[in-house]
Amino acid sequence: MKKLKHEAELFKAALLAGIEYAEGRKAVEFEVTDSASDKALYVYRLLVHDKIIAPMPEEQVGEKTIRHRLASWHAHQLPDGHPLLE
């Protein structure tokens, strides 16, 4: 797993985009008390269910790999020349 240059920032943006997608789809309503890890896992599973991203083997599913997968997903959504892709 190759670390992305701005992975932390990409993950934060990906989590926000994923939450917006999930709530816009009316699949979930997140609470303020939900942890970022719980939100990330839900967003990952929803994106896999909707066939937007490819699933990982279940033994590889963990917080670190989910963060990386969501950051990679969001990086592919950004236009060329975006500051987070440099």
Image (cartoon, helix red, strand yellow):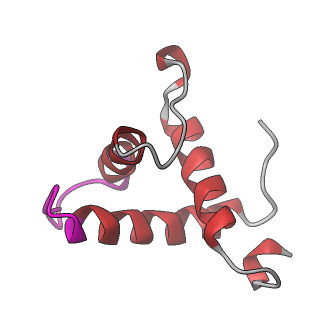
Considering every residue shown, the one lying at the far right of the view is 86
Look at the magenta stretch and give its main secondary structure: loop
What are the residue bounds of the magenta stretch?
A: 23-37
28 to the left or right of 75: left
Res 28 quadrant in image: bottom left
4 to the left or right of 33: right
Please tell me which residue is depicted at 66% across the width and 54% down the height of the picture: 72
Please tell me which residue is depicted at 30% across the width and 45% down the height of the picture: 42
- Return the x and y of residue 57 as percentages of the image width and height: 54, 19
User: Is residue 55 found inside the magenta-colored segment of the image?
Assistant: no
85 to the left or right of 37: right
Residue 13 in the image: above or below residue 46: below
- Return the x and y of residue 82 as percentages of the image width and height: 75, 84
Res 64 quadrant in image: top right
43 to the left or right of 69: left
User: Is residue 29 found inside the magenta-colored segment of the image?
Assistant: yes
Residue 40 in the image: above or below residue 74: above
- Return the x and y of residue 65 as percentages of the image width and height: 58, 37
